Image (tube, rainbow, N blue to C red):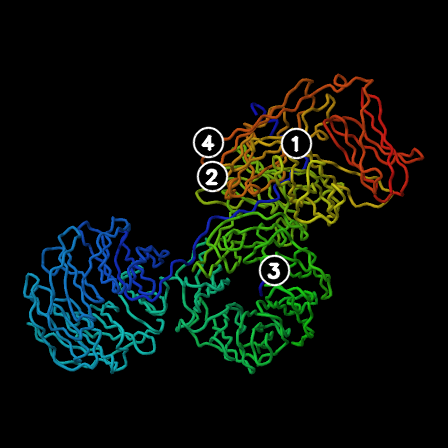
Amino acid sequence: MKTTLPTKKSALRILWAVLLYPASVPFLFAQLSSYIPLTSGGIEQPTALAVGDLDGDGNPDVVSASDGDHRIAWYRNDGAGRFSQQLTLTTEAHGAIDVETGDLNGDGSLDIAAVASLDSNLVVFLNNGAGGFETVQAVHLAVLKPRGVELVDLDQDEDLDIVWFSDAADSIGWLANDGAGTFTPAGGIGSDVNGLFTIQVADLDGDEDLDVLCSLPNYDQVGWLPNLGNGQFGALIWLEGEIPAVKYILATDLTGDGLPEVLAASQEDNDLFLLPNLGGGQFGGAVLISNIIWGNAPFQAADLDLDGDRDILIADPDGNLDWFLNDGQGDFSVMEEITATTSGLQGLKIADIDQDGRPDIITFAYWDLIEWLPNKEEDPFSLALGITRLSHNPKKITHADLNQDGHTDLLLEADQKMAWFPGDGNGAFGSPRRFYKNQYDGAGMIQSGDLNGDGLSDVINTRLFGGGPSDQIRWKANNGGGDFSGFDHTIISNMGISGLSDIDVGDLNGDGVNDVAYAAYNSPGGPEVVGWFENNGAGQFSSDVHLGAGTGVNTLVACVDLDGDGLTDILACGGYVGLMPPSIFWFRNLGEGNFAPKANISQTGTGYYNAFPADLDSDGLTDVLAWQGAYGLFWFRNLGGGAFASSPASLSPVTEIDEVLLVDLDRDGDIDIVYAQEDNGDINWLENQGPAFFQAPQLLATGPSDITGLHAADLNEDGYPEIISWSWANDASGYYENLTGRAAISGFCFHDGNQNGVFDADEQPLRGVPVLLEPAGLVAYSDAAGRYRFNVPPGDYTLEASNHYCWERIVDSTYILTLAEEPIQGPDIGYAAGNSQAGLIATVAMAPLRCTEIVPAWVLVENPNCTAAPGMVEVVLDDLLTFVSATPLPEAIAGDTLIWDLDSIPAAQSRSIYLEVQAADANYAGEITNISAQINPLIGPGDPLVSKLYVAVDTIRCSYDPNDKLVNLRYVPIDYLPVEHELVYTLRFQNTGNDTAFSVRLRDTLSANLNWPTLRPLGSSHAYYTVFDTETGLLEFVFDNILLPDSTADERGSHGFVQFAVQLLAGLPPGTVVPNGAGIYFDANPVVLTNTVETRVVDPVSTHAPQEPRALNVYPNPGSGYFRVRFDRPANGQLSVRDAMGRLLLSRKIPAGTAEASIGLSGYPGGIYWILWSEEGMKPAAARIILQ
């Protein structure tokens, strides 16, 4: 189914262990590696192979020539038979038809010579010794369409010359080598070779010089040209016997006497003949070896069974290889058939690919396929492994454990071919393995599932024949160990189906076995059809059940329970956008394979390209995410009982989308959205902060453009899914490693609900838990997935974790660890929930404000407690800021106030809101402005209202340094309370370079006047991890693979920020200054230093005269429930609200330095109320307000 102090060390250690205040971590943290290719660089119509050790590592590599793309390329062998991606030498060898390897310049390294038939050129590539090549010569042969080349020492001067031939020109010639790899024409070989097809160079007469053997199909004969010495050749000598339409020939010693016999194949009769060498240039008559071979393909001879004599290997008409065993006396009456080969073989080579001392077979077929067959002692040549990787036009990738080794394998369909890649559990994959013998067999969409009840993953796919009611669905049984060598099983339709577009497997009739659902866009039963086939449990299927017509080209069919009744329903999507009937619909499963009529999910007038089922809001019901391409993403919430929201929620501003994937990328327990940006290859992430509360889009990686598919699977078994992508237009498929899972020492902090000490799949991760590693003196904070990590060198360590705020440890918190060279999994630390008061906290950050520009801003809402809490967040923009957009969109906008109604936020979790605002013009340069955020818990009228306000303040500038440091409190009173006067620092950065920044590191040394153990990492613009050094006070934020664009390419996207909070030490005397600055490192560039901000401890009595009253500006007034109180200068006092009868309704302390506060009176009756202000050393102030 589709389914992160000088000499105060000892005291600090104690504080780390007992401090109970919460720590919040970044709400963006998933990271992807750069693109890792799975397939790339295909070939079109290979014509020849050569084998040799090109890189000097002792392993035979493979070289190919292909005339469909004019390519000469090679494939590096790692010694175990695993080959690299294609290494292209040229795509300008027009009509590339032959290739050979040899040391052409005497430097001990193998070079390459290739024939470009259409150019009449011979191209020589000289090797630098490590597999690096240069095109040294392109020798024009001045002959029509040369067809082949051999590298031999024809003139016996101890260097390799080049012999060439042309069947089109009936000519043979050679180029003399000067010993340094420079070649000059040396003349023709023979003048009477009319009707020439191919040649072989060998010492046929035993005189120690090389002669030339020729096939002449026009004469139904084989002849040879004797070498007279010094590059001179005698007249053509005919061999005895008629061989009708003889084409391919081979000269090889089959009897062990040192003389080469001649093998010749008849294309007309498909016969193979042996002409024995009698010595002295005499040959016996043709002896028939077989009359069942394929006479239109080359053949080889080698000692395949290691008995000391050469056997014969040749293709037969069925696409198999016939292996004729040599008895040592030239008798080849025993033949074994090798069936693992593909049909349509064009040629083969013999070499020990895997270096096991046994010769293996390398083959190529004209349909873009090069493979090798290992010669295993048990069951030799039973397996074909790809050297080329099915690169052309990839259409679908999925995953399963096909060989039962516990690792994830990948299944690929490309160019109507299918293969699978065995995974090793570390993110590496073995050679691809075909499913079908005939590669051009119309393979379409693929899926996996157990269809015959043996517990093994079988493979199912569509088979397309290009129109008409004849398309098929078929499956291959897994015989165990990834063996799919059995018969093909075809699922027949009694109606006929054309245009099969998707398939899925699921138990549709409740019998415990997988059935098959399909979608098609043409059928005799209707223009667009959804249906299913019933499986009897043994992989035998009934005729299809036609459920109904869809809309447009049906792009999706999914087997999924949509109404929560435990039965598998069918979801389908029509696939068009525009004014049209509904395009997303489903069929309710009524039980026992009965389905209700089609029910619409989308409404009339709206179409969608595709739809994806997933529980986006974590309510246990499967929702539907719909994709409208350039128009964005839309969420159809499942309301239960099979009912869906009539109007979908738009996840704007996400637009211009190529492909969509739903996956829990950060492993925080909810489903995120990953999508590919249209045309540019960007992989973006919408983090679901639950429930269905999505963070602003974040660029994770960039790879091949024009992405046509996305898939997710954990390929390296670190618990985090990798993102797999493919591009039809670019002939590329590959994946991005999820780096969230990388660390030298790592583990998880979690709410151990059943207190069994194990982080079970249904248990909640805890974010923000500090974990101490000694003797490194480092503290890591668990991220939103509960994961802590340390990147430290090998050694012995002690890991310590303590009770954390309201969370209490289940087991001992001290662990002894030994780290060797490989990363290790540290302990998973379980906690039980203690008692705590519900409450939410909001913080705000914004990019530097520049005149008239649109800048990003971020609001983080966190629940630091052990109890889930709902709430309403109000964000108020200053008059000098204009709202542009937000993700998610606010539920209400009232003037300058934006309101979001938050569903319950789980304990120790957070939500984020992304804003874009526009600053006022240059007339307001130098003006101070702000964005404030206030949380109003959702409680009933009459209950005390608790409103917590956070204000981000900045100055509008028309030019500025974009890399800076901010602090929320510049002054604190002498009687400050560390908890209530917590400092929040904001580090802002921008890439003003001329290229993308791949890594950003922020380093901040904390003042000794700060209480280091109270450090709380907060929100950020991008994914990061945090490490704090408890000995030096160095705090480091690391943004790996941030892919931060430069400001000229994407001004808004070039900004980033991170926030953290920390408390002052208690009892600092008046006049104390707490400074803070930071260094920013973009990639390997020099450090960028920020400004230094200061917080001062002051005596407020000395700063305001008693006779100077404070002015209060309250707005809106009248108001409907929420009021803002703006002070004429930073405040430090008590704000209260009383009704007309003088009864106290609300009272709270306003921290020093506050410029504006918020009052919430929702739920109270309309009328007159009074806002009162009191402050030590000043006259009280009051303002009357009207609540409407």
Looking at the image, tell me whether mark 2 or mark 4 is earlier in sequence order: 2
Q: Position of residue 692 (x, y in %)?
A: 67, 53
* Residue 594 in sight in this render: yes
Q: Is residue 961 above or below residue 271?
A: above
CA–CA distance between discs 2 and 4? 15 Å
Q: Earlier in the sequence, mark 2 or mark 1?
A: 1
Q: Amino acid at mark 3?
A: Gln
* Contact between labelled residues 4 and 2, with CB atoms less than 8 Å apart: no
Considering only vertical position in the picture, is 87 above or below 749? below
From the image, state whether disc 3 or disc 1 is nearer to you. 1
Residue with the mark numbered 2: 994
Of the numbered discs in the image, which one, if any, rests on residue 923?
1
Q: Residue furthest front?
A: 923
Query: How far apart are the two marked residues, 2 and 1, measured between alpha carbons?
Result: 31 Å
* Horizontal arrangement in the rendering, residue 379 relative to residue 983 (left or right): left
Which mark is in front, 2 or 1?
1
The label number, if any, that marks residue 1175 in the structure image: none
The residue drawn where x is 71% and y is 43% is 866
Q: How far apart are the alpha carbons under marks 3 and 2?
A: 34 Å
What residue is shown with label 4? 1086
Going 58% across and 56% down the picture, which residue do you hit?
A: 663
In this figure, which residue is indicated by the disc labeled 3? 628
